[in-house]
Image: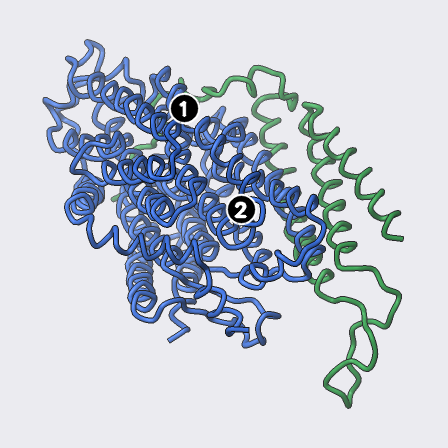
Chain colours: A green, B blue
Amino acid sequence: MEHLLALTVGILFSGALFLMLSGELVRFVFGFVLMGNAVNLLIFTAGRLSFVAPPLIGKTGTVPAGPVANALPQALILTAIVISFAMTLFLLILLYRTYAQTRTLNTRQADFLSESAGDDTGAVTPEKDHS
Amino acid sequence: MTQVLIFPILVPLAFAVFTGCFRHHPSHSSCAAIAGALIHLASAGWLLSVVTTQGVVVLWVGSWPSPAGICLVADLLSAVLVLITAFLHVAVMIYTRFDTTHKQIRSGFHPFMQMLTAAICGAFLTGDLFNLYVWFEVMLMASFGIMVMDHPAARLPNAVKYVTLNIVATLFLLTGIGLVYGLTGTLNLADLHGKIVLVENDGLLAGTSLLLMTAFGIKSALFPLFFWLPAAYHTLAPGVAAFFGGLLTKVGVYALIRLFTLVFVTHPHISHTILMMAAGLTMLSGVVTAASQMDIRRILSFHIISQVGYMILGLAVFTPLALAAALIYMVHNIIAKATLFLVGGLIQRAGGSFHLTQIGGLYKTHGLLSVGFFIPAFALAGFPPLSGFWAKLLIIYACLESRHYGAAALAAFVGLLTLFSMVKIWMEAFWKPAPQNQTASDTRVLSPWMMGPVLGLCLMIVLMGFFIEPVFHLALTAGEQLIDPAAYVAAVTGGK
């Protein structure tokens, strides 16, 4: 089972890297989502797979009765999923606004290649409007 | 008094909420932000005083037993960095009082800055690898928010570069954390110190350490992973650029120092050799690229990269003296670099442009500003008796002591090139006669709210240069704590 999951993680990673390096920013988002899932799967596998009881304690005891599944990787993955949701959302909105400005999401276009884009706007710092 | 640890994180978080409530009253919001920064400074000072008297302080959040819970740990390195963060926070909050528009404040400038400060302090204070990842994410989110807020046209492609490269770095970091957990079964840094030597799969361990080095290398803008930094930093408003340029890369440097002194010390011939090479190339490539730039903000951005190289060099040499030098360098650089970005903003206000060809003659019209530039610039280049001289001297001395003659020569040479860039800004912006098309700059009076923080930071640079002895002793103690982390580990694991 570990081998199968390890292979899946590897395939997901290579697919994600391929998408990320393609130069189209929409593909980068797909790559990001894919890699996020690959990492979550990796953490899950790293926590050792076992077919045992869920990590729950009965009403009477203070420790679980027998061997239970490792709960820590699940907590870690949950945190990572929430964060990657937020990141994906931010990324999508940022790309949408970028597209509205530049009319392209291809990183080989001049808007993305030139690092000094925006320099010629001159005084970037707005004047204060304090009363 | 272990609760003291939570305040440098809790105070900015509380003020993030507070300033958020006031965001429709910009002047109230600014005052609340300054008050928050001052309380933050007080809590950071309290933390350092506790750490210097009691040694390593540990707080188990939620009182979970060691090592299952999440802990906050402050040794000297963390406490000093938290204090310097708080100093910069105060300076930037005062500076931005007159440098942010009402629109920016309404869209949440102050809550984002407070969140960013909380996240930076959280990253400095956490004793848990996964927690470090979470603080990095909070830091990223807050910095994204500030970066895209109130953007004029054509800034977003630069923000895209910053965002994409940084989230790739956090994915690498998370992958590394997953592998570390798989190898050792723990993510507590002090616990890892004991368990990492028991790992049998040597190859995977070395690979994991290099993966984490890559992740934090992107964060701290090491060669060849620094491309996000010059793409993004020069588009920021001066106050924000000072905070970002001063602190964000240093959090990455801090994480590298923490991991490669406490956890990954099993393969120094691989990891520290790579760090040494990366440090040298970072110093050189940053300073050489800066020499070809004419925009003040771009020159300063490339110098951030070059200066990070010195700190990593201190880590790579790996002696107590070298680590002490790295710490002094970080403190000196955070102050000097932030001051220069603030001065850059003032130059733009006084001269009308960030571009060196379009300004001049500021020495004649703004004498105090030229003092404010002179001090941090020559501190950065390493002139005695300013703080940068001692920082560079200690790094070079540590290199010579451990027979890294090439690295020492490179460090001295890069210092010379830094001087070239600083003299270039001085000659172009201050010394040469004002170009004909420049608007009458005599009329532009600089607000004392903006000159004040700059001169205050300059005073800190001068004082640190004159009173280097107590600073050096503090840093040397911190360096010894880092080389021999027994006290750190015992404080966290309870001597088990």
Instruction: Tell me the kind of residue under disc 2.
Output: Met
Q: Position of residue B299 (x, y in %)?
A: 35, 24
Measure the alpha-carbon separation of dots 1 and 2: 31 Å
Using the rendered view, name the quadrant where residue B434 is placed. Answer: top left
Residue A74 in view, yes or no: yes
Near-viewer residue (A46 or B476): B476
In the image, is residue B413 above or below residue B270?
A: above
Q: Is residue A67 left or right of residue B205?
A: right
In the image, is residue B191 above or below residue B218?
A: below
Marks 1,2: beta carbons within 8 A: no
Instruction: Tell me the kind of residue under disc 1.
Output: Leu
Counting residues from the start of the chain, the first of labels 1 and 2 encountered is 2
Q: Position of residue B481 (x, y in %)?
A: 40, 58
Q: Which residue is mark 2?
A: B141
Q: Residue furthest bottom?
A: A60
Q: Is residue B328 left or right of residue B216?
A: left
